[in-house]
Amino acid sequence: MADIEIVQPVEGAARVTFDYAAAAGALDALRSMTSRLTAQAEARIGPYDDVVINWAGRYREEFDEAWRQHHYGFTAALETASARAGLIYQAIDDANARQRALNTEAEELALPVPPAR
Amino acid sequence: MAEADAELDRLARELDAAMAAFDRGAGELRPANFDPGYEGHLVRTLRDESQYLAAWVAQVGLGFRIAGGDGDGDGVFEADDARLDGLVGPASMYEAMRIPPPGTDPAEVAHWWSLLPREVRDRLIEEHCSELGQLRGLPAEDADRVNRLRLERDLTNLSERLRNVELTISGLQHTPSGHVDPELYRQRDELRAELANAQKVARQMQDLDHRHPPGPPAYLLTYEAEGNGRFAVALGNPDTADNTGIVVPGTGHDVRHEGGLFGPVGDGQRLYDQMNSADPGADNAVIVWMGADMPDEVWPSALNGTYGDIEHGAAWLRDDVAGYRAAHMQASGGSPGHTTVVAHSYGSYMTGEALEHGMQVDDFVSVGSAGIDADGPAALGMSRDHVWGAAAPGDPVPDIEWHGQDPADEEFGGTVIATNDSEGHSEYYKEGSQSLANLGRIAVGHYDDVELRPPD
């Protein structure tokens, strides 16, 4: 499970509407996406050794270009995973900020009312 | 590679589930424009690209071997690239998926499609059936999938759009002024007509799919709901058939007309059965073509020549037939098969126009012709023994010759077939008739068996 900060509600405070477990699950999935796509990209060149070694001419050039584009697709997907993780972390931060605000509000309400002069 | 692709599939599903859970649980803190399906889609795209590239590499590898690329036997395939052209498509999936524009030569379309791996074709059909529906030259099986999908989507979309327009009109009618923009009424009427066209085609296909006893498979080759609608159905697979008969009906037979489809489809079924009787060993198919706006009725519509859309109709017929031929040639190693157009009444006039503008068929049979605007078979680009005419006793239409000469008139210079036991304008496809037997014989190329009308 992704290690994320979770601000708990204090006594008397409302709980922010945010599923921290689902957010952590999404981060785990993105981390898994990164590692598995990296492994896939590395493994996929193997079957094409024959092409790289034994082809000559225009079709070899076409393959090289297509493979480069395809590999670029893997790289772009990894970058996307990272950017999307950033969005989720931001949502977690926002949830925590809101919970802190709710906590502060509850704590202020719980303070004893100063006696009237 | 299959296991690696399955791994990407699993990853995509896991991402879909995790992102959807986050999306549901984030409440108001959901990031703006967050698409929970985005990662899964990316991974599936990578899987598809990988599959495509693997299939392409296999194709090229096969091509190298076919082209005998390793001439000096050193294991390096220095094939003459030009010899591989035509055997393989582009290496990039995106380039391969670029759909040719409408109007592209059907042979080019057929070739482009043949080079795509099955997975890519499936994806294109699912995601781009509207664009594919504008092309000619797709194989009958795929054209059928494309058009049935378009039909299904039309039935839903047109119903929804019609309902919205009707609600808007009703709402406006209940305002104090009660004013409704006439444009809304026009839209409503147009949508009603289009929906009715789609429903008629759907009913016809359902009828063909569930007939008892079952007939040959039916392929929806052409479908448009707009305007008067366009429809062509094949009985049997025309791509692999040795002989294909194309039935072109006449006045009153287009999608828009009530009952416009069922008569010609019945004629097509009888011709199909007759072709099988004439040559049981051959693979036969019939295409029933109703791809044009036909005149509403003989009198006065067809007679005054202003009804029906002969120009577009003839061009569409020519182009559709070119598409069927291209698909056949692609599927059958370059052979176009034997194609016969059997055209009735006003349909023979339209077919004559299509032939004069370059339509290619092996035989043309005109039955109960409304006249052809041509001086004879040569003007149609055909020889006299491949242009056939029939005029049944008591059929008044061929005598009028209002669009030109009747091919059943000996002066036209074609070959006139006997139709002794048919009567009037509508019995050329009558079960058990001499006329239908002759149509079947011509359509399978058994010319010597055709019974001719004795010369006057």
Image (cartoon, grey):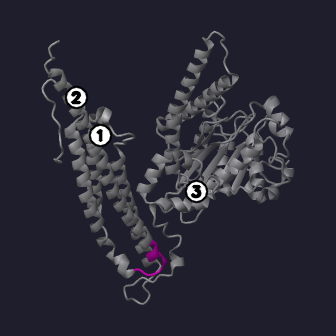
Q: Quadrant of residue B170?
A: top right
Vertical side of B242 occupied by B310: above or below: above
- In the image as oriented, which residue stretches furthest toward the front? A117
Q: Tell me the CA gap for discs 1 and 2.
A: 27 Å
Q: Tell me the CA gap for discs 1 and 3.
A: 36 Å
Rendered image: mark on residue B20 = 1
* Prevailing secondary structure of the magenta residues: helix
Q: Which element is circle 1 on?
A: helix
| Number of marks present in the image shown | 3
Q: Residue B56: x percent and y percent?
A: 42, 67
Region of the chain picked out in magenta, as a range: A55-62
Asked if both marks, 1 and 2, belong to the same chain, the answer given is no
Say which amino acid is labelled 2. Answer: Leu
Asked if both marks, 1 and 3, belong to the same chain, the answer given is yes
Say which amino acid is labelled 3. Answer: Pro
Q: Which residue is mark 3?
A: B100
What chain does badge 3 belong to?
B
Name the one closer to the observer, A27 or B48.
A27
Q: Which residue is mark 2?
A: A102
Q: Residue B84: x percent and y percent?
A: 50, 75
Queried whether the magenta region covers residue A61, the answer comes back as yes
- In terms of sequence position, does the residue under pointer 1 or pointer 3 come before the other? 1
Query: How many C-alpha atoms fall within 10 Å of the one at disc 1: few (<14), some, or many (≥20)?
Result: some
